[in-house]
Structure formats: structure tokens, C-alpha cells
Amino acid sequence: MNSMAVFSLKGGTGKTTISASLGWILAEEGCRILLIDMDPQGHLSQFFKVRTPPGRPSLFDVLIKDQPLREAILPTAQVNLEIVPAGEENLRLNEALIARPWREWRLKDALEASQPLSYDLVLIDVGGNLSLVTHNALLAARVLLIPVLPDLFSYLSLKTLFAFLQEAGRTYQFFFKMIWVLINKINPHRPLDRENRQALEQYYGKFLVPEVVREDVKLVQALRQQVPVTQAAPQSTAARDLRKVARFIRTMVLAAPAP
Ligand SMILES: Nc1ncnc2c1ncn2[C@@H]1O[C@H](COP(=O)(O)OP(=O)(O)OP(=O)(O)O)[C@@H](O)[C@H]1O
Ligand SMILES: [Mg+2]
């Protein structure tokens, strides 16, 4: 099964926005998508207005109490798009993981134990820090998508992230099948953004998604209304850019071009 973590060390690069948007667009196009909200902040779950109801296991129960992941999956408002939401107890998840055996591998194990699951892609939104929760998200994924902003700190944090990945690869004997860097929130009219894009192309060219997501206030407005931008403003710059990124993911990760 295809699995992709959306992660950057830097906060606010658009991980949740991109996870929600790509999940929605791919589901609209007929792909079966499972979202997993591994960010204890739970923004993805809040965006989709999904909470674990009483009597159903939460992500915390799955990772800490060996409950089946299959039973933690809930529907969203979009057909083909399901989610394992984060609850408030996830704020304690990192601490609770410390005492568990195979503590970095629990999400991967839970996914494997729940097979067969009939998703085209498991999409995991991850918080922007390094913790056991992050390790679980990364070790459960075969593909890594790293959103970056066209600024100096994003560029520097990319260097740190690649160093971390190299170290984690040695420690866990774990390597991603693919790593993609996606430039988000770029304003092509801003000279500094263009310069930063060139620097990213020069040093990380082979990892760069050829499409970018431009800065667009329509995306912020749509998020505020808790509606995907492709629905709130289908012809907006962000909606068009995100559809192109979804097409790229279909071709490269799902090996299935859009209909
Ligand atoms: N292309 C874009 N154009 C304009 N605003 C954007 C764009 N992408 C994301 N944003 C805005 O940037 C902010 C941060 O986005 P988001 O919360 O998705 O980042 P994140 O990486 O998930 O943050 P965190 O590290 O806190 O999890 C949000 O207000 C979002 O609306
Ligand atoms: Mg987020």
C-alpha cells in the first residue's frame, strides 16, 4: 500500500493544508485515501470536523493500547476520503510511547496488522518537530513530501532534515522510496522568492516537485471556512496549483494519471 508522510522540521510550511487539499483532490478524482492525523495539535481533524466518538478506539488507543487501526477509521464529508483523527489525548502520546516496546514502529505495525486495507494512498500529516510521534509517522511511510517556503530558514531546515534522515536511515535501516520537496506559498512576483527558488533548484533540484503552490489568500479563506479550496474557489490559483501537484503525486507515487 502506498503511504506518504507530509513533514518539515520548520513549522507553518503548509503540511496540514497540503495534506488536507491533496487528500480531498485525490479522493474527488476517485482514489481511495486514508488520512492519519499524527500532529498532536489535531488541525487536520479539526479541519474535517471529525472526532472519535465514544466507544470507538482513538489513534492513542491504537498506538498505546494495541487497538485495531481499522476500527479507528472514520468517514469525512468527501466520498473516498477517510481519516484516523487526533484527539486531545494525543498531547500525551509522545510520553506514552516512551514505555512501549518497538516504540518507533507502532504506526507501521498497526497499519500492517489491519491489512488488507483497500486504500490507494495513506497520507500522514506530521507535526513540525522531532519526537517519537514523528518517528512513528516517518517509519510508517514509504514516500516523504516536504513542503518548504521560499525563505532562508526553510532552506536551512531542509539541510538539517536531510542530515536527520541520513542518521535515521543508519539507526533504523529505513530509507524512503522517494523524497519530494514542494515549494509552497511562493509569490513569483517577489524577487526574493524567485532567488530562493533558484537556490532550492540548485541544491535540491532532484528532489523538487516540478509544480509549486503559489501564495493565495483564497486558500486561507477556504481553510477558515473549513472547506477545501478546490470547492470554495475551484478556479483560484491555489486550487489549480494543488490539482497539478495531485496529478504529479498520482503519476509518481500512485502510478496512475488523473482521469
Ligand atoms: N499556498 C498558500 N498560500 C497562502 N497561505 C497558505 C498557503 N499554504 C498555507 N498557507 C497558510 O499558512 C498557514 C500555515 O499552514 P499550515 O497550518 O498548513 O502549516 P503546517 O506546516 O501544517 O503548520 P504546523 O507546523 O503548525 O503543523 C495557514 O494559515 C495556511 O492557511
Ligand atoms: Mg500542521
Image (cartoon, rainbow, N blue to C red):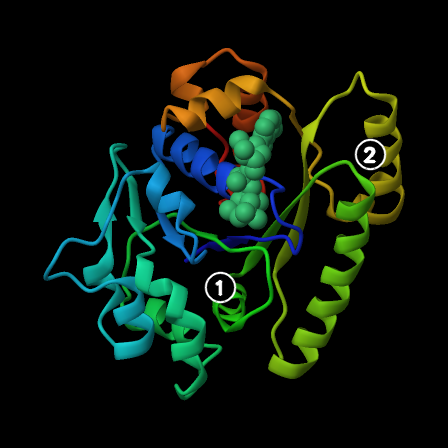
* Disc 2 element: helix
Q: CA distance from mark 1 to mark 2?
A: 28 Å
Q: Residue 173 location, x and y as percent?
A: 62, 80
Depth check, front residue: 190 or 231:
190
- In the drawing, what numbered circle is on residue 197? 2
Q: Nearer the viewer, residue 181 or 44?
A: 44
Residue found at the very far top of the displayed protein: 235
* Mark 1 / mark 2, whichever is N-terminal: 1
Task: Give the residue displayed 47% in from the left and 29% down from the top.
Answer: 258
Give the percent coordinates (x, y) of residue 136: 48, 69
The three-letter code of the residue at mark 1 reads: Ala
Q: Which residue is mark 1?
A: 137
Which residue is at 28% across, 66% downward? 115
Q: Is the N terminus in the top left, top right, bottom left or bottom right quadrant?
A: bottom left
Quadrant containing the C terminus is: top left
Residue 116 badge: none
Classify 91 as above or below 81. below
Q: Residue at x 65, y 82 (%)?
A: 171
Q: In this figure, what is the number of numbered marks?
A: 2
Residue pictured at 12% horizontal, 58% vertical: 54
